[in-house]
Image (spheres, rainbow, N blue to C red):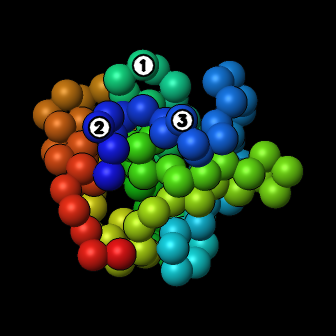
């Protein structure tokens, strides 16, 4: 994916400091929800997506490197994975996993490996 899975790509169009909360998130094969929280921390940037009814109201954590582009005018974020690939990612629980280095490594490893898109 990228050399740094936890950083936005230079080509993504993300402007530092922009509030992404509420942006719709689009996988390569359709909508997966809306941004509930995001971080721009260097080396650990991510978005937390509220999936709504798609996977029964769960939240998912996506490293910033999964973001292929940000469209501020549309308030949409596009990611380079399918719904199934995102659904198969390590399960996320905000109370346990935010700031947890082991989980961070597990998710980073999942998104950094090649996937058939």
Name the residue carrying label 3. Answer: 10
Give the quadrant of residue 63. Answer: top left
Q: Nearer the viewer, residue 27 or 32?
A: 27
Task: Classify mark 2: residues with Cα within 10 Å, few (<14), some (14-19) or many (20+).
Answer: few
Q: Earlier in the sequence, mark 1 or mark 2?
A: 2
Dot 2 lies on which element?
loop
Between the C-alphas of marks 1 and 2, the distance is 14 Å
Tell me the distance, in whole angstroms, between the alpha carbons under discs 3 and 2: 12 Å
The residue at 45%/63% (across/down) is 80
**Numbered disc 3: secondary structure:** helix
Please provide percent x and percent y for residue 15: 68, 30
User: On residue 42, which mark appears?
Assistant: 1
Please give the name of the residue rendered at 35% of the width and 23% of the height, measured from the top-left corner.
43
Q: Is residue 89 left or right of 28 when viewed as pictured?
A: left
- In the image, farthest residue toward the right: 73
The residue positioned 59% from the left and 59% from the top of the image is 78
In percent of width and height, residue 117 lies at 35, 75
């Amino acid at each position: 994916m990228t050399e740094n899975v936890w950083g936005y790509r230079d080509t993504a169009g993300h402007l530092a400091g922009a509030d992404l909360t509420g942006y719709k998130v689009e996988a390569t094969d359709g909508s997966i929800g809306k941004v509930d929280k995001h971080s721009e921390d260097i080396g650990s940037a991510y978005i937390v997506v509220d999936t709504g009814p798609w996977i029964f109201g769960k939240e998912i954590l996506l490293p910033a490197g999964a973001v292929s582009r940000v469209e501020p005018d549309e308030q949409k974020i596009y990611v380079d994975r399918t719904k199934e690939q995102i659904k198969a990612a390590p399960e996320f629980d905000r109370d346990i996993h935010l700031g947890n280095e082991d989980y961070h490594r597990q998710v980073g490893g999942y998104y950094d490996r090649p996937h058939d898109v």
